[in-house]
Amino acid sequence: MASKNLSAEKRHRQSERRRIHNKSVKSALRTCVKKLVNAVHEKDKTAAETYMRELTKQFDTAARKGIIKLNTAARKKSRMQKLVNTLMA
């Protein structure tokens, strides 16, 4: 980017770094969700509970940092918990 505005160039560099970081965080969330769903389908209670704790922590962190919205994190945590609860019944 060959702009005369140095602050615009810096802003672009910052946003690009943040975009790449946010992408990796979202990818890690999706991976954790897949692990949890697989554990539930295999009816592995201990693994499901472990993944649920980890997933809750990751969703809360991502929401706090503004990578995903608060309500999105709450909705996804709720749905995953309902899935885990099917093992307990």
Image: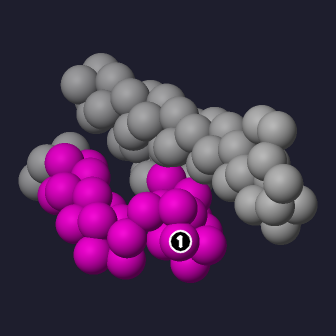
Q: Quadrant of the N terminus?
A: top right
Residue 26 visible, this angle: yes
Q: Position of residue 42 (x, y in %)?
A: 30, 21
What residue is pinned by disc 1?
66
Q: Secondary structure beneath disc 1?
A: loop
Going 63% across and 46% down the picture, which residue do you hit?
19
Predominant SS along the magenta part: helix
Residue 68 is inside the magenta segment? yes
Question: Residue 78's spot in the image, x, y percent?
Answer: 23, 66
**Is 79 on the left-hand or right-hand side of 19?**
left
Residue under the image location 49 percent in, 53 percent down? 55
Residue at 72 percent of width and 51 percent of height? 12
Residue 44: image quadrant is top left
Is 14 rendered above or below residue 66?
A: above
Instruction: Name the quadrant containing residue 2.
Output: top right
Q: Residue at x 19, y 57 (%)?
A: 79
Task: Specify the segment rendered in magenta.
Answer: 55-84
Q: Nearer the viewer, residue 7 or 73?
A: 7
Residue nearer the viewer, 34 or 3: 3
In this picture, residue 48 sits left or right of residue 6: left
Q: Name above or below for residue 24 compared with residue 56.
A: above
